[in-house]
Amino acid sequence: MPVPTESILDKAAEGQRLDGSEIQVLFDRGGLLELGQAADIVRQRKNPGEIVTYIIDRNINYTNICVYRCRFCAFYRTPKDDDAYVLPFDEIVAKVAETVAAGGTGILLQGGVHPKLRIDFYESLLDQLKTTFPLIHLHAFSVPEIWYLAKLEKMDVREVIERLIAAGLDSIPGGGAEILEDETRRRIWSRTKASTGQWLMVHREAHDLGLRTTATMMFGVGEPTAARVEHLLGVRSLQDATGGFTAFIPWTFQEENTDLEGEIEPSGGFDYLRTLAVSRLALDNIDHVQGSWVTQGPKMGQVSLFFGADDLGSIMLEENVVAAAGVQYQMSQGGMERVIRETGYKPKQRRTLYESI
């Protein structure tokens, strides 16, 4: 006899762990409002009170040249494309200076996986930024970049991360996760890059070395919800072992200008909120879940605060990857605080690792 969704929601709301079959039931049969109510209870238990956090930082994409050419990506370019680039260091420094002047406390530094940039490029960049801006938090280089660099240099992943830490790396973003289920990953890539196990391994090594990281999920690429369940279980299992994830950030695939455009049915707001709520209920060992106003827009960002999210991420002084797929929402600090206040919550600026300012 099928387990009633009500009993599963009650179980999660009471702080008990859901197994994979129960998480699947919530995807398959959970009512949207009921999921939101249960997720909000968990959110309040994890982060009680009236505060919703945000950060001022900047997403600097130091290159758009990428060897992988993923089918879901509108940002990458080949070295021969007219608009391919690698940003000069002085331009990156100028972008960081603008961020600091705007009250920013962190930099999200990611790029395409460039076939010829060696580890000394990354070390020099980190060193220059940390020397020039000693208080800025460098949240940089996701798994695909680190994995490829280890192969290029014929180094262990651990050694690569150690060298980047020595140069100034403060934490690692969750990019490159997409869906942590290999059949889906193979379908949406053009070339083989880090598998589910390899993505988790890089984060495990980072955690072992004392770095905090984030976990992400880009969904809505035609995957079954069972793949999302596998993703959540993989993240939760690693968090059990290391405790190194600061937050979980899910968002929907944006299809415009990608090779997948027109091939799949895009996810809408209902699917976004359902997946956000289920994520909050499933990830009982991760403190923070972030609402994605960057892909969903400010109004849906507000709604996400009642479906498990306790944070709205960055005001995004700069964002290029999602913008390349045709989504270009903008937000000022004042706008972010107004959006949060309109929901009845109080806005609070934070740092990258959720420290108060």
Image: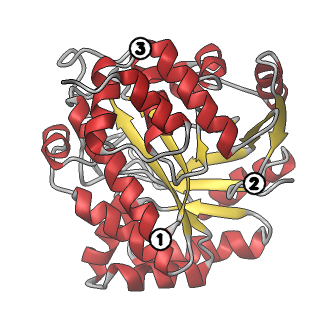
Q: Label 1's element?
A: helix
Between 300 and 13, the one nearer to me in the picture:
13
Q: Residue at x 20, y 29 (%)?
A: 224
Q: Does 219 sit above or below residue 354?
A: above
Give the amino acid at mark 3. Gly
Between 77 and 230, the one nearer to me in the picture:
230
Left or right: residue 101 versus residue 331 is right
Gap between marks 3 and 2 measured at Cα? 35 Å
Left or right: residue 68 versus residue 93 is left
Q: Which mark is residue 31?
A: 3
Colouring method of the image:
secondary structure
Q: Earlier in the sequence, mark 2 or mark 1?
A: 1
Q: Does 148 sit above or below residue 317?
A: below
Q: Does 5 sit above or below residue 77?
A: above
Q: Position of residue 34 (x, y in %)?
A: 49, 17
Quarter of the image with the N terminus in it:
top left
Q: Position of residue 99 (x, y in %)?
A: 76, 48
Q: Residue at x 12, y 44 (%)?
A: 183
Q: Position of residue 226 (x, y in %)?
A: 22, 35
Q: Nearer the viewer, mark 3 or mark 2?
A: 3
Q: How many marks?
A: 3
Q: Which mark is residue 351?
A: 2
Q: Label 3's element?
A: loop
Q: Residue at x 29, y 67 (%)?
A: 148
Identify residue for label 1.
Answer: 242
Q: Earlier in the sequence, mark 3 or mark 2?
A: 3
Gap between marks 1 and 3 measured at Cα? 33 Å
Kindly indicate the quadrant of the structure image that contains residue 228.
Answer: top left
Q: Earlier in the sequence, mark 1 or mark 3?
A: 3
